[in-house]
Image (spheres, grey):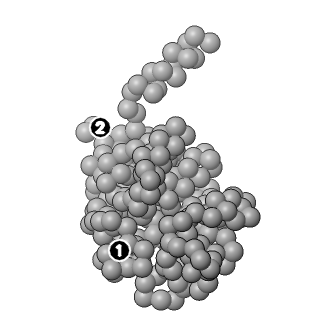
Amino acid sequence: MRTLSGAAILCVATRVWPVSTPTGKIKADATSVLIIVDVQRCFMAGGTLAVPHGEDVVPVINKIAAAFENVVMTQDWHPAGHVSFASSHPGRKPFETIKLGYGKQVLWPDHCVQGTPDAALDKDLHIPQTELIVRKGFHRDVDSYSAFEEADRKTPTGLQGYLKERGIERVFVSGLATDFCVAWTALDARKAAFETYVIEDACRGIDLNGSVAAAWSEMEKRGVKRIQSTDIELGSAQI
Ligand SMILES: [Zn+2]
C-alpha cells in the first residue's frame, strides 16, 4: 500500500499531460474534444446577460480550436417565460436566488430566447470543423448550465453518449461563464470519467459573491485540471 500511495503522490506532484510534446505542451489527439460553452451574443457586451469581458474569449478560442479536430459547442436556448428568468416570478429580481423543485436557482434577466438574434452564436467565432452544437435549457421548467445534464440532475442532454460513442476520452472546456456553465460542464465531464481540462484564459466569469473562486475550488477538488491556452500545442490536430 505504501508503494501505491507513493505513486499517487508522485502523480499529483508531476505535471504529466495526456499527450505531451517535446516542448512539454499538450497535444490534442483524436480522442480529445474542445467544448465551447455558450459563446453567444447574449453573454457579450450589449447582450441581455453580458459576462464582464466575455468577448475577450473569442480570439483565444479561435486560436486554440485549430489544434482540435473535434469541436462541440453549446448554445443556451430558452423558450420565452423560462423558469430561470426573474420575469417569470412576480416580485423577484435578476440575480436573486429562489428554491425550485430541483433545488436552488439563480434568477437571470431574460436571455438567449430561442430564435432571437441575442441567442445567436457570436459572429466572430470561426471554427468550421465544429461537429455538434448542443442546445440546452429548452425545457421551460428546468434550467441547464451543464452541457451534459440539466439542472434537475437527472435529465441528460445526450452529450455524454455522443462523446463516448465517438471514443472521446479527454475534454477541454472553454467559454462562458467560468462559474456557471463552464464549471458545471467540467464537473459533469469528470463525473462521466473524462479526463477534464478547463482553459482558464479561454473563459470569463460572472462572479456573484465569490462564485468564480468557489467554482475553481470545487473543480480542482474533483480533479479538473486548470490550464492556460499557451499550454496547448497549436498546429495540426493529427498525430
Ligand atoms: Zn440561460
Figure label count: 2
Q: Is mark 2 within 8 Å of ligand 1?
A: no
Which image quarter holds the N terminus?
A: top right
Q: CA distance from mark 2 to mark 1?
A: 34 Å
Q: Is residue 206 above or below residue 19?
A: below
Q: At 38% from the left edge and 32% from the top edge, which residue is drawn?
A: 15
Are there few (<14), some (14-19), or many (20+) residues within 10 Å of tag 2? some
**Residue 150 vs residue 37: left or right?**
right
Circle 1 is placed at which residue position?
A: 44
Circle 2 is placed at which residue position?
A: 24
Whether residue 89 is visible:
yes
Query: Which amino acid type is shown beneath numbered disc 1?
Result: Met
**Residue 48 vs residue 54: left or right?**
right
Pick the residue in front: 219 or 101: 101
Q: Is residue 132 above or below residue 220?
A: below
Q: Is residue 7 above or below residue 237?
A: above
Q: Is mark 1 within 8 Å of ligand 1?
A: no
Q: At 25% from the left edge and 39% from the top edge, which residue is drawn?
A: 23
Pick the residue in front: 147 or 64: 147
Are there few (<14), some (14-19), or many (20+) residues within 10 Å of tag 1? many
Secondary element type, mark 1:
loop
Residue 150: x, y in percent? 65, 64
Lower sequence index among marks 2 and 1 = 2
**Residue 28 vs residue 162: left or right?**
left
